[in-house]
Amino acid sequence: MYKISLVTALTVLALIGCGGGGSSSPGGTTTTTGTLIDNIISGVKYINGTSTGYTDSNGQFPYTGGLVKFYVGNIKIGELNSLPSDNRIFVQDLVGVSRTDTSDPRVQQIGSFLQSLDSDPSTEEIELTQTDFDKFNSLNDDIANLDVSTILPNAGFSSVRSNTKAKRHMDNVLKYYGIIADSTAPTVASSIPANSATGVALNSNIVVTFSEDMPREQMTSSNIVLKDSSNNTINTTISFEWNTLTITPSSNLLANETYTLTLDSSLKDFANNSLGTNTNISFDTVLSDTTPPTISSSTPTNNDVNIGVSDNLTITFDEEVDVSTINDTNIVLRKVSDNSVIGTNVSYDNSTKTATVNPNVDLTDDTFYSLTVTTGVTDTSTNAFASNQTIDFMVGEDITHLGYSYKVLKSPITGKNWLDRNLGAYSVCTKSRDDASFVDDAAYVADQQDCFGDYYQWGRLADGHQEAITDAVNTPNKTVFNTTATRSTSYSNVGHGDFITNSSSPYDWTENTTQDTNNVDDDGSLRTAQWSKTDGTSVCPISFRVPSFYELAQETSSVTDRNTAFTNFLKFPSSGYVNNTSGNNGLRGVGGYLWTNSTNAFFFHNSGAMIYGGFYKSEGLSIRCIKD
């Protein structure tokens, strides 16, 4: 229930008799005091004959006889031809139904309207201010003809009381005035924490649920007291709604302490039945915790380079943290290039111990950011992070190039960025050839072949030669190639997509002075330059290129065989190669071969790995691109 108070110079009432009695005016007219009730309703306009005014702080008005009408602004709430014998006018009386009939839609409509206008939710009465009253002066109609859920928002009221809650409110009023009999004393139905609970978190609120609704005015610090084991009273904030009491300590509780919440025996329900005896709820807090919190996982992970421009960021802690410390001051997102702070909205889910950081604007693709959790974040025992923890990441959307999609990996060795798979691969490899599930090379190829990728002749562009005739997901792919023995007269525009075989020295796919007296690119410098381009016109996506001998050697220094090639962050597959003489794919499952931008290549097999310069330009090997 809610209280409506109206303080206005217009609220000037004639002399009003006390209680339900009456008084006579000099002209012989008897004036009786009436009361408008959905509990007490003050600030509603009444018109009785020539007398008009507003119900006072007790919901009362002078009544001289005959018809009395009630208004909010120019909305007519209802009317009654005569005052009931108890001098009280309930909403039900205005509608013309039994006072116990709170299910009538008209009763609920009026109740919803009046309760929504309450200006003081700290009491069970209803108080209407002059300002709110005047918002409805332009509506000249009966409330029965209006839609409460429309007129209230139109007048600026964001919260509209539901019919269900309006009914619940009016049912409690009936108990208060004795119209519904209730002789059952209230009890505490449950509490969180429960009585005798242990291990209670230091940032806990205490929630008590009564067996029935209770008037909120009595829920005060004099009737509800929290004390520690030394009998010290703990400062708290008390809130109450219907039958649920919430006690919030003004600061975190102490560890390894016993607290007792006492509910005074005088607490009553709406029918004036009291608890009868003091009710105590005691509990013990968690043992002392001196361990600082830390990050257990995050999205992105440190050095991640595949975060989308509109992705939210998440941080999961290893223990519950104090939600009041989770904010954009203690968790800070910055752009690395200029250290500028990016505005965010930070929320926290205690059940998962996870903070979600939602940037206020989309992040910029191909840009580095840092997300820092500062020492301002504490756990529920007030332990702060031992030091600032920073997660560095790059925003990078999926890269699409020549019909294939890639993500980006940041090297934990050099910090450089690489494509996550070989050129032309459908997926990232998930198993090594040495996985116990593979009985032979064929079994490995059948399971992992979609991560093998294309096979390029050295320095040649993506003109189709790199792709096998059968080239689809979940088929025996990249094994059969169209071939020709005619060497190309151009290094940059071959003019067809056939794989060019050459079984004679210098084993090149272009014409050369040894075999053809035509130096297309004998020393390979033109093709090195071609494969070093980063504008997307070479084999790699924009901003990427074929790595140098040194760059690939740095990243693979710990690779000693095909298994460690797979466990390397680049997850190299044992994809084999295409033979320069036959144009057939060979050694798939045995090992892998990758070009650099020189004729040196990196290869590995079941028992060894090295960078080697003896590969023929007309052989078909894999490529892994590096960002320039």
Image (cartoon, rainbow, N blue to C red):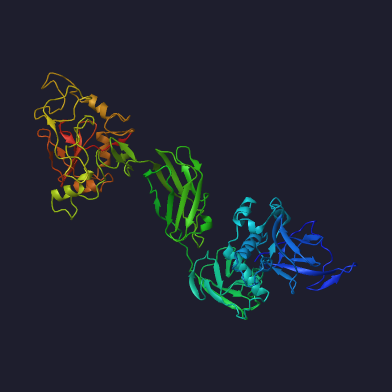
Residue at (58, 61) in percent of width and height: 162
Q: Is residue 78 above or below residue 479?
A: below
Is residue 438 visible in the rendered image? The answer is: yes
Quadrant location of residue 15?
bottom right
Q: Is residue 189 above or below residue 483?
A: below
Quadrant location of residue 45?
bottom right
What is the total number of numbered labels drawn onto the structure image?
0
Residue that sits furthest to the right in the current view: 26
Which image quarter holds the N terminus?
bottom right
Q: Position of residue 156 (x, y in %)?
A: 64, 51
Is residue 43 visible in the rendered image? The answer is: no
Q: Is residue 158 above or below residue 309?
A: below
Quadrant location of residue 241?
bottom right
Which image quarter holds the C terminus?
top left
Left or right of 508 on screen, residue 21 = right
Left or right of 309 on screen, residue 144 = right
Q: Position of residue 258 (x, y in %)?
A: 54, 73
Left or right of 576 on screen, residue 554 = right
Residue at (58, 63) in percent of width and height: 163
Q: Nearer the viewer, residue 205 or 564?
A: 205
Q: Position of residue 226 (x, y in %)?
A: 60, 71
Q: Position of residue 419 (x, y in %)?
A: 30, 40
Q: Nearer the viewer, residue 616 or 461?
A: 461
Residue that sits furthest to the top in the current view: 517
